[in-house]
Image (spheres, rainbow, N blue to C red):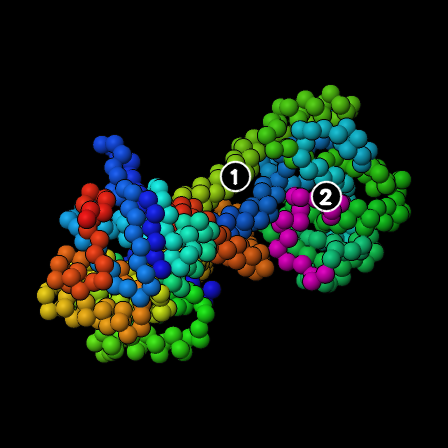
Amino acid sequence: MRLLTGLALQNLGRRKARSFLLVAAVAIGSGIVFTGATLMRSIDDSMAVGFSRLGADMMVVPDGTLTNITAALLTVEPTDLVLDADTLDKARLASLGRVAPQKIVRVEHSGIGNHHESADLIGFDPARDFTIQPWLRERLNRELKPGDVILGAGRDAPLGSQLLIFGKPHVVYGKLGRTGVGTHERGVFMSFATLEALAGAMSHHGGPGPAALARGKVTGFLVELAPGATALQARFAILSAVKGVKVVTGDSALSGIRQGLAALLDGMLALVVLMFASTAVMVSVLFSAIITERRTELGLLKAIGARRSQMVGMMIVEAMIATGVGGVLGVALGVLVMHLYERSLVYYLENIGVPFIWLDLPRTVAFAAAAIVLAAAIGALGALYPAWRASRRDAYDLVRGEG
Amino acid sequence: MLACRQLGKSYATERGVVAAVAGVDLEVPAGQFAAIIGRSGSGKSTLMAMIGGLSRPSTGTVKIDGTDLWQLSENALAAFRNEKIGYVFQFASLLPTLRLIDNVTLPAMLGRRRPEADILTRAGRLLERMGLGAYLDAYPAEISAGEQRRVAIARALINDPELLLADEPTSDLDEQTEIEIMDELLTINREVGTTLVLVTHNLALAGRAQQIFHIANGAIVT
Ligand SMILES: Nc1ncnc2c1ncn2[C@@H]1O[C@H](COP(=O)(O)OP(=O)(O)OP(=O)(O)O)[C@@H](O)[C@H]1O
Ligand SMILES: [Mg+2]
């Protein structure tokens, strides 16, 4: 093994121009694959957040609710009418993706803001919500718990401070970014449990309290379309499965963008796979040429008593060193490029409303390792067949450069 | 020591089957110096390649010390070539990416039967004897064709072969160099007792052999 490695290194070292080209080709290929995969995963992760910021595709509310459509469906409208919380789950509609139930009550004299100001108290299920939490701009460094509230961008109170609602103390857990949607800007958000706990305090001010505060009831649902489903299909499916509801469709352009971006990422993945395949083919072609050119040398090795396994081993070790080094350089190059373009990339994405989140370190390292191992594997496989074929021939034919 | 029976090799070409060597019988006792002569294209190199285990015969057998060469497995044949046969080609045959010393040690390194230090010492001594003691670290491209041929001889001798096959080792060299190299080969034959089969155009040299095989059209003529 040491002898074979030594021979391989000698060959690479003495044929600098060719080794350099080979290493460069593999470096470019694996660099693109590594960078592409890392960026794609990062953008994908970022988009998962960015998409949600675009709001839901549609909302489902009780028939008879007055609706005020805004471009992005972020919250349902306050109303006295309610639906059962499991209305949509029971229907099991294939055309629906995520479904987030919400409760909204508009209250006055709650103690929030100045005396006569009305405030929207919005309850959500933290586990299912996809339109509120993506807008969190700052929050306490812990999980959301009962008694916590999140404030819209239009309200001012320091994180962690106490907020009295109908006399009950709450903790300001987080604040949302600016959305431009009224209910969001002035809203006070909390979990269902926190909102339901206010029912007693509210009814004290007269009547049985808003219907939406009852356990198991919601004001409406924010709904995301399943991939590939159209708003029309979903609307039809909902209306035929559930009675007494109204379906409000959001800006169809946004649904289009969301689904289009998902397709774009799939396209990028295809491109990366293609790049990988073309690097593999190129390296194999290169090696079959290199080995053809070196038939005389292989023949001499055979003539002086090298076994076939030694001949093939030497070529494979040489190929793996070259392509492995190429892989390492490619990853280094990729890291450099991503570093150089980080600013403009982050700026661009944030401009279109997507906060850029880099892939976490363990996954990036895994990608880098995979790129290097794959590059070396391509080298080994590319060299294996031509080397094995050459090693089968008579030493004399190889030395004379035939075949 | 060396015995060929009905040895033949034919090539399939576009013009039909060409018999490069046909029905050669020859015997060379151990320690002997035998010469093979014949015109260009008569089949000398093809015959040598079959004897040296480099080219599989179409017909016949090659026996060296009783071992039927072409009945051996791939690996056994490789080991046999490595240990028992030294081969000097008709043309430059050094590995261009290795230093001279590494070219010479390579067959011994491949065989892995001796400590590395011994191999290096012996290779150094062989190169010195060939007058190349100052060039151990040089690369083949940095020395002349005649010097390269001497390195190839040193390489052929590194494993102390029992049979040394030299295919016109001096064909493209000047007369003075030819004499020097041939003297070297004959000295080894005489002093070490290595059986030597030499292909040559030089009839004076062939005259010094104990046996001469004259080849024409792939067959031995007398
Ligand atoms: N691979 C091959 N395919 C077809 N014909 C071949 C092949 N190798 C050798 N021959 C033919 O076999 C014959 C013998 O060739 P060989 O090289 O053995 O001759 P030679 O006696 O060594 O000649 P020289 O003195 O020029 O070296 C030639 O006619 C040659 O054309
Ligand atoms: Mg010849």
Give the residue pinned by disc 1. A266
Residue at mark 2: C-beta within 8 A of ligand 1: no
Membership of A126 in magenta stretch? yes
- Does mark 1 fall on the same chain as mark 2? yes
Rendered view: B78 above or below B12: below
Disc assigned to residue A128: 2
Rendered view: B175 above or below A294: below
Q: Residue A342, how many percent across, how many down?
A: 45, 57
**Residue in front for this viewpoint, A28 or A389:** A389
Q: Magenta residues, as a range?
A: A116-142
Q: Residue at x 68, y 56 (%)?
A: A174
Question: The residue under label 1 is which amino acid type?
Answer: Asp
The residue mark sitting in front, 2 or 1, is 1
Say what secondary structure mark 2 lies in: loop
Question: The residue under label 2 is which amino acid type?
Answer: Arg
Q: Chain of mark 2?
A: A
Q: Residue at x 25, y 42 (%)?
A: B20
Membership of B32 in magenta stretch? no
Q: Residue at x 69, y 47 (%)?
A: A187
Left or right, A181 with reference to A403: right
**Residue in front for this viewpoint, B45 or B216:** B216
**Residue in front for this viewpoint, A126 or B140:** B140
Q: Chain of mark 1?
A: A
Q: Residues within 10 Å of mark 2 (few under 14, many from 20)?
A: few
Q: Is residue B177 visible?
A: yes
Q: Residue at x 69, y 62 (%)?
A: A141
Query: Sequence order check: which comes first, mark 2 or mark 1?
Result: 2
Q: Residue A331, how many percent across, how many down?
A: 45, 58
Rendered view: A90 above or below B5: above
